[in-house]
Image (cartoon, rainbow, N blue to C red):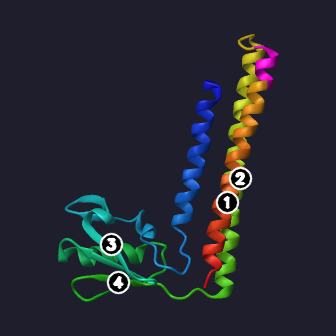
């Protein structure tokens, strides 16, 4: 592959990584500790990721257990969870916090699949926009006589192959997540 394509490949890879992060934050009826990745708590005046102030585990399929390193952090962690968009109510026994995930209804599962498809489509659009940027850049290079017409064609073909591979990767990620959401 031509090194001139590397920067565009890197941008496409970042789009895929971003989509994976978004999908990890979508709950599918199962407890997934990745849902808590974006949460930050005030730890001695410093906003710290939840994972750095507590042990997070999944003792059962629909329960996340959060055990803070310091028991005085329980109230702070509960406050952050309540303020988040997770839609979960934490319960604690003074030592650990438990988040119980309710079973998703069929209707909610279908809504989630629609949302996932929309996010995947947005990622595909981002990939196509990167392809367009790459092709525009290559055409400018050809116009400035930095590359030949044949080189332009080769670069455009390689860019299209790259785009196709990333689009198919998005499709397989989407299929996997949709299956996960619809599985009861």
| Residue ID at (25%, 78%) | 74
Alpha carbons under labels 3 and 2: distance apart: 33 Å
Element type at mark 2: helix
Q: Residue at x 56, y 46 (%)?
A: 14
Work out which residue is located at the far top of the displayed protein and give it: 145
| Quadrant in which residue 41 is drawn | bottom left
* Distance from Cα at disc 4 to Cα at disc 3: 10 Å
Measured Cα–Cα span from mark 2 to mark 1: 6 Å
Query: Which residue position holds label 2?
Result: 168
Q: Percent from the top left, x then y, of residue 126?
A: 67, 47
Quadrant of the image for the C terminus?
bottom right
Asked whether disc 2 touches disc 1, contact meaning CB atoms under 8 Å apart, the reply is yes
Mark 2 or mark 4, which has the lower sequence index? 4
Q: Residue 40 or 149: which is nearer the viewer?
A: 149
- Residue 130 % position (x, y): 68, 39
In this view, the mark in front (2 or 4)? 2
Name which of mark 4 and mark 3 comes first in the sequence. 3
Q: Which residues are magenta?
A: 148-153
Give the residue at mark 1.
Answer: 172
Does residue 175 belong to the magenta stretch? no
Q: How many badges with numbers are in the image?
A: 4
- Residue at label 3? 56
Residue 150: in magenta span: yes
**Secondary structure mainly formed by the magenta segment:** helix
Residue position for label 4: 98
Q: Residues within 10 Å of mark 2 (few under 14, many from 20)?
A: few
Q: Secondary structure at mark 4?
A: strand
């Amino acid at each position: 592959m031509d090194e001139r394509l590397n920067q565009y490949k890197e941008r496409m890879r970042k789009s895929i990584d971003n989509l994976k992060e978004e999908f990890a934050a979508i709950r599918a009826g199962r407890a997934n500790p990745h849902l808590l990745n974006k949460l930050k708590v005030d730890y001695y005046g410093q906003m710290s990721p939840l994972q750095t102030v507590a042990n997070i585990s999944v003792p059962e399929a629909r329960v996340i257990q959060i055990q803070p390193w310091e028991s005085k952090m329980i109230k702070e962690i509960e406050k952050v969870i309540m303020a988040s968009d997770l839609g979960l109510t934490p319960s604690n026994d003074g030592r650990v916090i438990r988040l119980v995930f309710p079973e998703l209804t069929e209707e909610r599962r279908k809504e989630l699949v629609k949302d996932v498809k929309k996010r995947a489509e947005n990622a595909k659009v981002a990939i196509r926009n990167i392809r367009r940027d790459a092709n525009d850049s290559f055409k400018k290079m050809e116009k400035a006589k930095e590359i030949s017409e044949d080189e332009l064609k080769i670069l455009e073909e390689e860019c299209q192959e790259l785009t196709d591979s990333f689009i198919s990767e998005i499709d397989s990620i989407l299929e996997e997540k949709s299956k996960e959401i619809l599985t009861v």
